[in-house]
Amino acid sequence: MRFKYILFVITFSLLFSLPVIANSVPTFVEAEGRAIIINGDLSEARRVAVNEASEIATRQATAFVSASTRMQDGQIVSDNVRFSSSGVLSELNILEETLSGNELIVRIRARIQPTQGCPGGLPEVAYQRNIGFTAFPLVQPSQANAGGLHEMPVRLPELLARELKQFPGFNSHTATHLQIHPNLDNAPTQMLDDGTLTNFQRSTEQSNMQFIVSGVIRDIRQRNPQGGREPLLVTDLFHRLDPNNERNLRAFIMDVYVHDALSGGLIWQKRYMTAGLWNARQTRTGFATDAFWQQDYGDKVRREMRQVVTDLNDRLRCEPFTARITQSEQNRIWINAGSLAGLNQGDRLSVLRRQTHYNTMNEGYPEFVPTQVTVTLDRVEPTFASGTLNMQASHVNIQRDDLVRSQ
């Protein structure tokens, strides 16, 4: 009998760890992209519009669904459903081109071949992870005077949050009134009272987010706003009137950081650098306006912003969904996530116990230790959920501020 029981458990586990393909065949998707025509360059505008439409088409092709169950000693210790929205685009056809003022609108039809899972063969999780975007302050605010770009520290992360929200699995929020780096020159590193350096953020857990995205805009200055005179007056005048002269280049250098909000640890950072022609001189275009995007500089900045969103999706899409336990009572717990995060009745999540370590200044650093405990949700509200554990919470000391995780 015991042999049959073991055989059943192994078969059950293998059966539910196999991927379930919701749509493994190629999908045909139609999408629309837009681009500003700069200096009459229709070909470049078409390329930018097609790229944007291609990105949108790929996002829409949610294709892979998998379910996995892991058992130990005859008990389910993790049970998760996940999906993947990534795919390979091919057979792209332009269906329609429309001119609206100086904007080109391109509609495409593309063939999307679904790809499955994350690096290492892991599929993506099916829950919405809360991502908070703070302000992206300028190291030298005076550099925003040219063009009146003073709203960039607030508007840029707002646009990033809006774009990331278009990807499956993310629920982005803006908290651009917050600036989490006290010293911009050294961000994300800060010095503690005992003189040690750290990238740890202590206040992120209070945000009720899973990840915090912050940034610092290092440089947006014009390379040579006035420009030195050429030896020959005619040559100097020609260069000044030439909108494509390199003296009109303007820099854009930005650092982006991602902190795990529950532990405060820095999990990813990257620098983005580009430069574009700025021909508006001192005209106050403002940031993220039509006049700004029409500049070659604005187009280059927008491309970098799209790359940031793509990189954030690549870095975070395979991270497990995590929520905080807000209350525990006998064999029942409550968590700070609900139907808005994609949770449903019957979902099972693994439970992690918080342990705190202390440095020389008696400041606590959390560590989350896996347990063999799972919770099955039986009540799901928009912003919270509750369920029963497979054992008494007191038996393994599960309490407030411990975690549940999707894998």
Image (cartoon, helix red, strand yellow):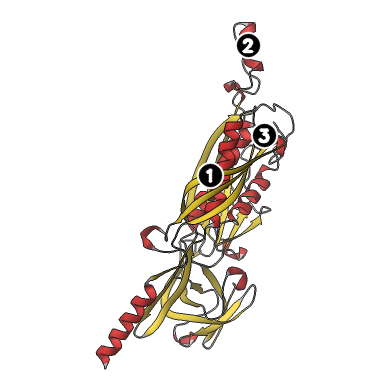
SS for callout 3? helix
Q: Residues within 10 Å of mark 1 (few under 14, many from 20)?
A: few
Residue ID for mark 1: 93
Dot 3 and dot 1 residues touching (CB under 8 Å): no
User: Which quadrant is the N terminus positioned in?
Assistant: bottom left
Regarding mark 1 in the picture, which secondary structure is present there? strand
Q: Position of residue 110 (x, y in %)?
A: 52, 49
First reached walking from the N terminus: tag 3 or tag 1: 1
**Nearer-the-camera pick, 361 or 285:** 285
The correct choice, above or below, for 72 with respect to 80 in the image is below
Q: Residue 175 at x, y = what percent?
A: 66, 56
Instruction: Answer with mark 1 or mark 2, whichever residue precedes in sequence.
Output: 1
The residue labelled by disc 3 is 294
Q: Which mark is residue 57?
A: none
Q: Position of residue 105 (x, y in %)?
A: 65, 41
Residue located 61% across and 9% down the image: 235
In the rendered view, does 386 fall on the left or right side of 390? right
Q: Seen in the image, is 248 located left or right of residue 318?
A: right
Q: Is residue 237 above or below residue 11?
A: above
- Alpha carbon separation for disc pair 1 and 2: 46 Å
Tell me the CA gap for discs 3 and 1. Answer: 26 Å
Mark 2 surroundings within 10 Å by alpha-carbon count, few (fewer than 14), some (14 through 19), many (20 or more): some
Residue nearest the viewer, comparing 275 with 244: 244
Which amino acid type is marked by label 3? Answer: Gln
**Location of mark 2 (residue):** 236
Is 214 on the left-hand or right-hand side of 366?
Answer: right
Residue type, numbered disc 2? Asp
Residue 75 percent location from the top left of the image:
39, 84
The residue positioned farthest toward the left in the image shown = 3
Q: Nearer the viewer, mark 1 or mark 2?
A: 1
Q: Residue at x 44, y 62 (%)?
A: 24
User: What whole-number distance in Å separates the C-alpha atoms at marks 2 and 3?
Assistant: 26 Å
